Image (cartoon, helix red, strand yellow):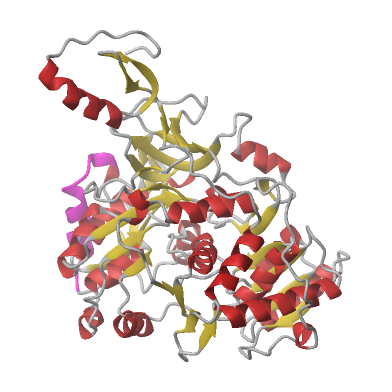
Amino acid sequence: MALNKCCIISVDKESENTFEYLSRRLVNTATTQFLGKKVAMPSPIVRGPPRLAVQDTSLGEKLYRNLLEQGDKTVMVDGLTRREMTARRLLELSSRLAEGLRARGVLPGDTVAVCSENSLEYCLPVLAALYLGAVCAPLNATYTPRELQHALGLSRPKAVFCSRLTEDAVREAVEAVKAAGAEPLVAVLDGDPGLLPLAAAVGVSPGFAPRPVPRPEDQVAFVMCSSGTTGLPKGVLITHANMLYCNALRRYDKIRGPSDVDKVLAYLPMSHALGITMLTACLEEGVLLIVMPSFQPDLFLQLIQDYKVEYVPLVPPLVAFLAKHPMVADYDLSSLRRVSCGAAPLSADLLRQFLARFPHVQHVTQGYGLTECTLGAVFTPFGSDNHASVGTVVPGMELKIADPETGAALEAGRRGEICFRGPLVMKGYAGDPRATAQAVDGDGWLRTGDVGFLDQQGFLYVVDRIKELIKYQGFQVPPAELEAILMSHPAVMDAAVVGVPDARAGELPRAFVVKKKDVSERELVDFVAKQVSPPKRLRGGVQFVDSIPKNPSGKILRREVKELYLPNSKL
């Protein structure tokens, strides 16, 4: 059906309401007249509901005001020690640190980096930087000195906050960047609330207030490191407006559902987009944040049980753990009512296994996004039972499936590159205008590098990464599809699929599998073969391994899988 052309449809009066309902659910941007009313017509570009209203302020001002309002309310708990932090104490410490940084010459637009495992103190330099109108650069606590040197080169911080665990790597990286003329201050977050020599001798001036930013949509709040699944990370520039809009979406009832969340487990690294947005959103909304330094299965389960946690954000490996691991049965997790899952594809079969073990979970929200889109631009609408899809586009955002070569929008059902436009899209990459231009076109469309398709109702289905598709005899084989099938086998705890070079076929799909119980290679090869077309069969075989390399958000690092288990393969 051609766009923007009149279409005459004859239906009886009784069908009018049904037609209007169906028309609203079509993938749409174009409209036409039907019985005197505007109704939607199919179009390749999907627009979410109307854009949400967001206050024109800085993230620092917003968080400062909300902490002031919360007073003596406990806003954070250390999951290991059960030590608590009130809003008043957090405000005092972060304000003192802001004054200390200002006294050391940190100005608006300068960068403050944080390289630490999660802790109650992690948020102090984050808040202090935001109060000053400076930029915060959260760095992965597992980075090696080489990786840290690269990350420091991207963000060029004036101060770096580390923990006792990361101090040696940070100091080695700082020594290396000094040769390039930089000399950032290094300060240690060591768990003592009076901690920071930088702030200990500094009082908060009576007139202290966070610095306003004139244009929140232009002012960078965070430099986030991209996942770096295909090379060294890039510095993703996230603005104050990006973060405020992302936090506003968490309050959108068609995503959140009817019940408010009153506590959240912070086990994902705060250096990750999900971790840092969870931190700022909880502080903004007054939700209790139960902080874990890292994911520890027994502590994770214990905290859900002890604090009667009703909502947990998950990644697919954790869904698999909860669905399959025997130790889960030793804890009372009956308080769980809602979960969300993102960062990597979640198979419908694994979700069914999870729900079979947790029948009291009333709603599972999937989501899809990436650091360059602040976090998630697609979420499962509340009440939807479409578990095969990652959901529909959020308010204010646009989505299209594009031809990777031409950028032209493709119709529903056709596979192409997933692209977004709207208030969540990053400002660009730090110091890399060429990479920015490659990622965001002149019309503002962000190219994700992921393959997907839309159905007629606007639900998005993610197939795989463009660069990670396996090329078998000219056919494109998506690894995530084969991984989902393997994960549905009761003997499989975890799995990754990559292409191994083959002189005749180009590449052969090979699976690397972590066993839950005994199973043979032949059994798994046959199990997959029965469910896929011939090009997708595991012609490269199955190799049993002890673990699958993943990044902190649970995304399979297929490049590292190859480096670890196929050292002689051409990468």
Q: Position of residue 348 (x, y in %)?
A: 23, 53
Q: Give the answer, above or below, for where 493 lies relative to 450.
A: below
Q: Position of residue 41 (x, y in %)?
A: 33, 20
Q: Give the answer, above or below, for where 235 lies relative to 473.
A: below
Magenta residue span: 518-535
Q: What residue do we see at 56% from left, 81% from top?
A: 120
Q: Quadrant of residue 195?
A: bottom right
Q: Is residue 387 magenta?
A: no
- Name the chief secondary structure element in magenta: helix
Q: What residue do we see at 28% from left, 64% from top?
A: 338
> If the image is split into quadrants, where does the N terminus sit?
top left
Q: Position of residue 244 (x, y in %)?
A: 56, 54
Between 1 and 47, the residue placed more toward the observer is: 47
Q: Is residue 521 magenta?
A: yes
Q: Give the answer, above or below, for where 519 lies relative to 306.
A: above
Q: Residue furthest right?
A: 181
Q: Position of residue 394 (x, y in %)?
A: 42, 43
